[in-house]
């Protein structure tokens, strides 16, 4: 059904395939052992996004203060809306 006349031909084809596979695996292991030097990329400060830059302590404190003020404003609005009912 697969193009072989008898089991002996299948066995011969199998042995040939196994030896080819062993050769390929040997070449692959040699290539892996050589190792390829990793590419090194230069970081250009102009291309670094703002998110990766570390913010100073002062900037972080200011952001927290602004966030707290906005949260207080929202709470005041909610409280005013409740009084109207």
Image: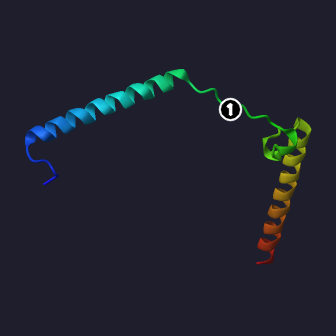
**Where is residue 23 drawn, in percent x and y?**
35, 28
In the rendered view, how is the structure colored? rainbow
The quadrant where residue 28 appears:
top left
Q: Is residue 55 above or below residue 5?
A: above
The quadrant where residue 43 appears:
top right
Left/right placement of residue 30 relative to residue 18 reads right
Q: Is residue 74 above or below residue 47?
A: below
**Residue placed at 84% from the left, 38% from the top?**
44
Q: Quadrant of the N terminus?
A: bottom left
**Residue placed at 54% from the left, 22% from the top?**
34
Q: Quadrant of the C terminus?
A: bottom right
**Residue placed at 82% from the left, 43% from the top?**
48
Furthest residue toward bottom: 85
| Residue position marked by numbered label 1 in the rendering | 39
**Where is residue 15 drawn, in percent x and y?**
21, 32
**Where is residue 18 drawn, in percent x and y?**
26, 32
Left/right placement of residue 71 relative to residue 4 reads right
Label 1's element?
loop
Q: Nearer the viewer, residue 75 or 43?
A: 43
């Amino acid at each position: 059904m697969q193009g072989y006349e008898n089991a002996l031909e299948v066995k011969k084809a199998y042995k040939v395939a196994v030896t080819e596979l062993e050769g390929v695996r040997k070449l692959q292991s040699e290539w892996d052992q050589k190792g390829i030097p990793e590419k090194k990329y230069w970081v250009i400060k102009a291309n670094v996004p703002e998110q990766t830059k570390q913010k100073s302590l002062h900037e972080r404190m200011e952001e927290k203060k602004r966030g707290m003020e906005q949260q207080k404003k929202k709470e005041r609005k909610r409280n005013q809306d409740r009084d109207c009912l």
